[in-house]
Amino acid sequence: MKHKLFKAFFIFLAFYSIEAAAQQKKWSLEECIDYAIKNNISIKLSALDVRSAKVNTSDAKGAFLPTLNGQGSHSWNIGLNQNITTGLLENQTTQFTSLGLNMGVDIYNGLQNINRLKRERLASISAQYQLTKMQEDIALNVANSYLQILFNKENLKVQQQQLAYDTQQLDRTQQLVDAGVVPEGDLLDIKATVATDNQKAIAAQNTLLLSKLSIAQLMQLENFQDFDTDDSDYPVDETGILLEQAATIYNKAKEQRTELKIAKANVEVAEKDVKIARGVYQPRLQGFYSFTTRAAYADQVIGVGPNLTSPTTVIGYIEGTNQTVLQNNFQPVLGRRDPIFEQFSDNKGHSFGLSLNVPILNGFTARNGVERAKIALDRSKITLQQEELKLETNVYTAFTDAQGALQTYEAAKVTLAAREGSFNYARERYEAGLINVFDFNQAQTLFVNAQSEVLRTKYDFIFRIKILEFYFGMPIYNKP
């Protein structure tokens, strides 16, 4: 019994260790981006558009093939109907089977099939560009969220360190108050400071949790509370991208940016749509072929013989003698029907030919279709111009933001150094009893704010540089 309990305990411990190890995984930026590329919902939807475009291309290829359709029917006729053997109306039940095969092929239709195939191929390329654009956007958003988590983690450490330091100051002030060195009001101020620090630490913790939720939604992670980044530092290195001119970056972006490729592909698609619409003006020549056969299940006529029920029929009288003129009555002699497959072979028929359709008047549908296609083409050209202007604005804005972020970061470091010196000087004076606790807290608050500002400007600058490098054609992630 004890052996089984120990065995169960070790199994539980093993599973717990595996689960704990899984929860302790620390994600790098590259891992986060690769995981998001594979699992993000928006990317999956865009991938479905690519598949749909391939299906449309297959449809366009299939339009070059002839159409081939077969049909068959079997019918029962019950009651008064014509006997196909005798030609008389009789109360009977008859059965018929008919088979057919129809084929048609477009010989000429205004080059619409050719232009439609070219159009769908261009649309497939555009859909692939859309997928690439979605992957790039998700990668950029993941990078932004990842850097935001790093900032929030560092900011939480600053707030927790400040809380720990003020807690120590509270204990020391309590001792000084008990010794009668400082007034009790200083103790109340320190308590209020500790309470404020605790609130800031809680707020920083909540902000960190929300930033984890943001990146978890991009990556489609279920348990975002256990998500954590690795401990790698992202130093602010000297980057050569700021040595480039904004115009150079823009010209490079015009050659590589996916949004411009999408807009150009859409213009080419619209041009093909105009050609397809104009094809309606031209005649359409089609070829057709039809094969039919049938079989009946009734007896067939194999000859004629005398009508024993009514052998003769009076057809007139001889003038003068009034002698009747008789005619022998005959009736068809029915025999067993031929085998079904022999009937199919004997009754087969073929028809083939050409069909020419020349448009003359169709209620302006052809003309209006061409006009709509031209409007769509003009709209796509304007959209391309808008994308170029938008890209130019984004590049120059990103370049200016990166330069400003660097300057802000450098200024924040200078401010931090000054605030740190001021804080150390204020602490020395406070410990010597030369300033009150309010002035000391002011210096301390300015120092903490300066630390947070350095962190904020640091990660803001890193992200601005990544955006600028992104426009310059440098990948923001390693593609899986």
Image (cartoon, rainbow, N blue to C red):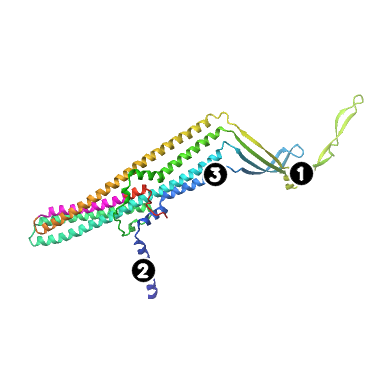
Residue 378 visible (yes or no): yes
Q: Seen in the image, is 404 located left or right of residue 113?
A: left
Question: Residue 183 occupies which quadrant of the picture?
Answer: bottom left
Q: Residue furthest right?
A: 321
Q: Residue furthest top?
A: 320
425 or 101, which lies in front? 425
Which residue in the protein does label 1 denote? 299
List x then y, in percent, for residue 166: 17, 58
Q: Amino acid at mark 3?
A: Asp
321 or 156, which lies in front? 156
Q: Is residue 430 magenta?
A: no
Q: CA distance from mark 3 to mark 2?
A: 58 Å
74 or 290, which lies in front? 290
Which residue in the protein does label 2 denote? 13
Residue 69's place in the image compared with 212, above or below, is above
Residue 109's place in the image compared with 195, above or below, is above
Dominant secondary structure (helix, strand or loop) of the stretch shown in magenta = helix
Magenta part of the chain: 435-464
Say which label, 1 or 2, has the lower sequence index. Answer: 2
